[in-house]
Image (tube, coloured by chain):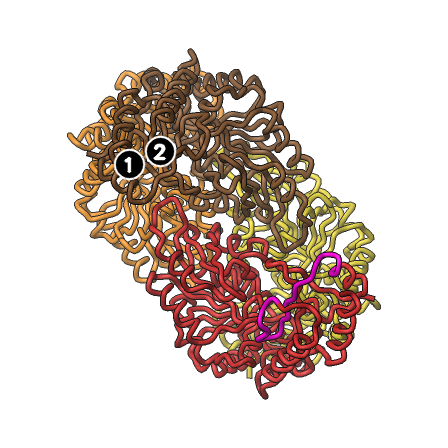
Chain colours: A brown, B orange, C yellow, D red
Amino acid sequence: MARYDFASDNTAPAAPEAMQAVLEANSGFTAGYGGDTVTARAADLIRQLLDADAEVRFVASGTAANAIALAALCQPFEAVLAHEHAHAATDETGAPRFFGHGLGMIPLPGADGRIDGAALDAALAQPENGHVQSPGALSLTNATEYGAVYATQGLSGLIGAAKAKGAGIHLDGARIFNAAAAGFDVVAIRPLGVDIAVIGGTKAGMPPTEALVIFDRPLARRLDARLKQSGQLPSKGRFYAAPFIGMLRDGAVLRHAAHANAMAQRLAQATPFKLTHPVEANGVFVEMDEATHRRLDAAGWKANRVFDDSVRFMCSWATTPEAVDDLVEALRQVR
Amino acid sequence: MARYDFASDNTAPAAPEAMQAVLEANSGFTAGYGGDTVTARAADLIRQLLDADAEVRFVASGTAANAIALAALCQPFEAVLAHEHAHAATDETGAPRFFGHGLGMIPLPGADGRIDGAALDAALAQPENGHVQSPGALSLTNATEYGAVYATQGLSGLIGAAKAKGAGIHLDGARIFNAAAAGFDVVAIRPLGVDIAVIGGTKAGMPPTEALVIFDRPLARRLDARLKQSGQLPSKGRFYAAPFIGMLRDGAVLRHAAHANAMAQRLAQATPFKLTHPVEANGVFVEMDEATHRRLDAAGWKANRVFDDSVRFMCSWATTPEAVDDLVEALRQVR
Amino acid sequence: MARYDFASDNTAPAAPEAMQAVLEANSGFTAGYGGDTVTARAADLIRQLLDADAEVRFVASGTAANAIALAALCQPFEAVLAHEHAHAATDETGAPRFFGHGLGMIPLPGADGRIDGAALDAALAQPENGHVQSPGALSLTNATEYGAVYATQGLSGLIGAAKAKGAGIHLDGARIFNAAAAGFDVVAIRPLGVDIAVIGGTKAGMPPTEALVIFDRPLARRLDARLKQSGQLPSKGRFYAAPFIGMLRDGAVLRHAAHANAMAQRLAQATPFKLTHPVEANGVFVEMDEATHRRLDAAGWKANRVFDDSVRFMCSWATTPEAVDDLVEALRQVR
Amino acid sequence: MARYDFASDNTAPAAPEAMQAVLEANSGFTAGYGGDTVTARAADLIRQLLDADAEVRFVASGTAANAIALAALCQPFEAVLAHEHAHAATDETGAPRFFGHGLGMIPLPGADGRIDGAALDAALAQPENGHVQSPGALSLTNATEYGAVYATQGLSGLIGAAKAKGAGIHLDGARIFNAAAAGFDVVAIRPLGVDIAVIGGTKAGMPPTEALVIFDRPLARRLDARLKQSGQLPSKGRFYAAPFIGMLRDGAVLRHAAHANAMAQRLAQATPFKLTHPVEANGVFVEMDEATHRRLDAAGWKANRVFDDSVRFMCSWATTPEAVDDLVEALRQVR
C-alpha cells in the first residue's frame, strides 16, 4: 500500500483546528464574495499576525495567488527575478507567464534555495535594452524550496538591491509558518519592503486556502475585479477564511509548523542517506540514486526527486514520530 | 440585521451531506493534485450521473471553470455566442477573455435567459472576414440566469445550428441540478452534443467546488497542465471532490434542488410583485421600482437588481418556508 | 473592372512626398531598431507638429498601436470607454483585448461617431464592484468613424469627465490630418489631457506607418521592450519614419488631407443619396438599400456598408475630381 | 563616425530590386488587407519557391510572425523546444509567450546554433505531468543564429523525433536565403514536415516584410482574423508583398544572399581573430575580449557581443569588399 506521508506537505489532511472553524463558519446565510464577517475577521487576524496594514483576500490556489501577485508587480515585457528552483519558476506550468501575459523569468542560483546576492546584483546590473525582459519584480520564497529559512538580514540585502532598481517585491509564503517556527519573524515582512505576500494555508495544514496580502494600497486598486477575472474571488468566501481563523486564533498554526519542523529534524538525524541541504524547516533532502529510489517506491513510500536531483521528504502537522521511524527503517532496508 | 437568505444561492451554508463527506475524506495521507481515491470516486459518480465517458476534474471556481472551457473551445481571434445576460458575458469581469486571451463575446437575445433560435441563426449566418471575431463556441446556461429551464429539444436546435458551423458547445451548469429537479434530463447532455460541461457544486449547496467535464478526449489533452497553469489544479483535491460524493451518492443534491425550486414556487405564488419571468427553477424575478427596492433593503432583505432590471430572489437548499413567508410579509410592507 | 477609389482611404497608393523620403532614407548603413537619424528626425517633426514633449515611436500597424496604447492605460480587469462604432470596438478582431489580456469595452452611443457626453457620464457613474470591468481608459477617435470632427471643446468635456474618475486618455488619430484640415488644432491634443495618441500615417497617404506618441513619460517606461514583445519594434525603423519626414517637412500631409476633405465635399454635394452624417472630413455616408448597393458593386464601385447601416465612401489624397464625378454618375444610374 | 556595415544584416538599406517592385506596386487603387493582385502574385512566387501548397501572408515583423506561428502550434500550457540561443528564446523580449499566452520555452544546446539531437531526444523523453509545460512545438532556425546551415538530413532527424511526440514544427527562416545560397534546398521544407515557416525578407535585403507560410490548412483557419487581432494584417498589403516580387522574380534574392555569404567568407579568411563557429552563411563570429571590443567600437565599427560571448559580424547584400577590407584593417589595429 502506498504511503504518502512524506510525498508533500499537502498530502496530509487538514488539521482539526482548521476544520472546526470551517464547521463553525458553515452556519446561516451570509454575504458572498468576501463580504462576510468570517472573512473580515480572518483578514484582521492576518493583519495582526503581520502587524501591518494590508488588503487581504483569501483565495483557493497558491499557484494563482503567486501568479496574480507577480502580474500585479511586473509588466508583460518585464521579468521576475526568482531562484532557479523556485516553485514559480519550475513547478507551476508557466502560471506566472499565463496570468502575467508573457512576463519572463530570470532564474538565479543560490545555495539551499536562497537567492545568491552576487547573482542578484549581476542580474540587476545587466544593461537594459528593448530586446530583453528586464527585472520588474523579485520573488522570494521563505522557507525555500530546499527547506532553508532566510534570515531577516539576508532578505534585507536582496530586497534593498532589487528595490533600488525599481523592482517590486513578492514573497511566496507557502511555508511561511515553517519559517516562522524556525525563527523567522513574520512581523519583519512589511518593514523589509515586501509589496505582496502570499501566506500559505494549505501546506500549513488547512483545507485549500491562501491569504493574498497586498501592503501597497495602489497595487490593490480594483483588487476584487482582478481576482474575479482570474477566477479567484470565491463566492462562498467563508470557506477560505475560516481555516485561518481556526489556525491563527490560538496559535495552532505555529505549533503545527513547529511539529512539522521537529519531525524533519527527527528524520534528518536518523536517515542513513546523505543530506543535500541543511534541515531548517520541514523538508529533508537526501542524495539517493535512481535504483534505490525505485526500491523505496516499491516499498510503498512515495517521495519526489526534485530539481537539484535530491530526493525530498516533507513533514507536516500530521506526520507522526512513528511514521518517521517507519520511514527510517525503510530507508535502511532499501539502502 | 441583514438577511442574505435570497440574495444569491451562494449565500447559504453547505449542506450537511456535503460537509459529512468532506469530513470523511479528511483522513489520512493521500496523493495530491487529484491522484487520490476520493477524486477518482467522485469522477465516477459524475460519469454515472451523466451516463457518459468524460474527463472529470474538480476545481474551485465556476468562473474559472467556464472560462477555461471557453478558452479550450475558442481561439483568441474567435468569439463565444452567449445569451446577452449570461454570467460569462456580464458578470465575470471578463474572465473568459482573460483566460481566452482576448476571445470575443457575441451577445444574443432571448426570453427568460434562453437564447433565441432565430438570433443564433442570424449570428451564425454573418459573413466572416478578418476584421471580426467569428463564432468559435456556443455557451449555454441551464437553468438560465432568469430561472428558466431549457427543454432538451430547445437545446438540440441551438446546438445543432452551432455545430453545423463548426462551433464547440459549452454548458454552464451552475444550476444544472435545479434544472434537473425541474425535469431536465442530464443524461441528454452528451448526446445533445455538449463538448464541455461545468456541473456546479457551489450553488447546489456544496462548499466551493465545480466539476469540469470534458466529453471530447482530444480537448482534454494535457488537461492537468492546462488547469495547473490556470490556478485550478488543487493540491488537496479531495476537498473539491468529496462534496460531490456526499451529494451524489444518495441523491441528496436533487432533493435539495427540488426543495429550492419549491421554495421559489412558494415565493412566486405569494409575492405581491409582478413576476418578470416564469419560475421554473430556484429564482424569482419581479418588477420593483428603485424606491421600493431601497425600502426592502432598509428592512434588511438583500436582493440584487439584475440586467433586465428585475429584482431577483434566489432560493437554495437552505431556504426555509418560514423565511419565504417572512420575505413575503416584508414585500407586502414595502410595497 | 473593380474600382477601389472610395472603398477606403487605405486603398490609395502612397503619396510621392512620402515615397521620395523613403527613397532618400534608403541609403547607407544605419543603426537598427529606431536608433537611426531618420527616426530621430521624424520624431522631432512629430513633437514639433504637436508642440509637445513626448516619446515617439514609428510602428507598422494602427491596430497594434491603438491596442498597445490601450493596454498601457488599462489593466486587464478594467474596460475601455469607446464609441460603440469605434474601430477599436468593432473592427479590429478584438485586438485591444488580445494585447490588453482581456480588457473590456464599454460601448457608448453618440451622433456621427462622437461620444455622447451624457452617456459617458452615466458610464462613469456606474457603481464599481468586483464583477464588472470598470473604466480604465477613454478612447477617442478624431476624425470619427463617421467622418465627423470633434471640436476642442467637445473633447475637453469628455476628457475632463474621464480623467476625474482616474481613466487614461487615448486618441486614435488614424485620420487626425483630415480632422486638422477641417480645423481641429493638433497642438491642443496634449493640453487637452491626452496620454497617448496614435498619429496615423497610412490613411494620410503614406506607406504603412503610424506614430505612437506617449506624452506621459512614466507610461513610456521600457517602451522599446513593450513594442518588441508586441512585434512592433521594426529593425529597419527608417522605413516607418521616413514617410512622416516626407509628409511633414513641408506640410504636404495637410495639403493632401485638405484635398481628401474637398473631394468628400464634392461627392456630398453631388450624390443623389441621402447623407446619414454631416461631411466634415474625408468620408461620405449615405442611405442605400441592399439592392442598390449590389448594383453599384456590380457596376464596379467598391464601397462598404458600415455599422450604422450607411454605405461609406472614403476620399483620400489620391482621389481625383474625375473619379468623384464618375462615381456620382454611377450613383445616379444605380439609383 | 559610426559604421553599421556589420552590426546586423538589417542595418543595410533595401536592395534596388525590392525597391523597384515597391515603386511599381505603388500605383492606382487596390483592395486592402491583402486582397490585392500584388499580394496574390507574391504569394504565388513563394509557393513556387517552396514548390508547395500553402497559405501565405506578408507581415511587417519577423518577431510577430514567429510568435504567431508558435502560438498557432502550441497551447499556452505547452512549451516550444528551441535552441537555447535561438532568437525566439533570447532576443524577442518574450514575444512568443506574449502572443502565445504564457507558452514555455525549453532551451536546447547544440553546436553552432544547431539543436543537438540527443538533447532533443532527452527533452522529448521527459515524463509528462501537470506541473510542467511539455513540448508542443519544435522551433528550428536556418541559417542558425551562429551562421551555420542545417543539412536536410540533420533537420529530418530533429523533425521526425518531434513529430513522433505530436509536436508541431516551426521554421524561422529569417536567413533562409543565406542558407539556400549555402546549399540548403528550400523545396525540402515542406516534405521535411515543417508546419509553418517564416521566410524572411528584411534580412535578405528587402524593406520590412516577412512571409508567413502555413502548409497545414487547418492551422490557417481564420488566419486573417488571427493576424488582424495580432496587429499583422496590413491594410496596404502591397507594400509587404511587392518586395518579394522584386527579389524573387528573377532570382535577385539568391544572388544577394550568395554575395553576403561570400563577404562573410572574405572576412573569415582575413580576420586576425579566432573564429568561434564555422562560417557557412553570412555571419562571422570571433573570440574577442572586452577591451578589444571597446577599441573596435571606439574606432567606429559597431558589432554585437552575442550569447555565447562571441563578437558577431553580419554581412548583407550591401556589404562591399572594401568594407570588409576596411574592417579587417581595423581588426588588425585594435588587436
The residue singled out by tag 1 in the image is: A335
Residue D222 percent location from the top left of the image: 44, 65
Would you name the residue on which mark 2 appears?
A273
Secondary structure category for the residue under label 1: loop
The amino acid sitting under disc 2 is: Phe
Residue drawn at point x = 30 percent, y = 42 percent: B212
Q: CA distance from mark 1 to mark 2?
A: 8 Å
For badge 1, the amino acid type reads Arg
| Farthest-out residue, top | A250
| Most foreground residue, D262 or B302 | D262
The span shown in magenta is D276-293
On whether disc 1 and disc 2 are found on a single subunit, the reply is yes
Picture coordinates of residue D50 (x, y %)? 47, 80
Q: Is residue B123 above or below residue A253?
A: below
Residue B326 shows up from this direction: yes
Do the numbered discs 1 and 2 sit on residues whose CB atoms are within 8 Å?
yes
Residue located 23% across and 45% down the image: B151
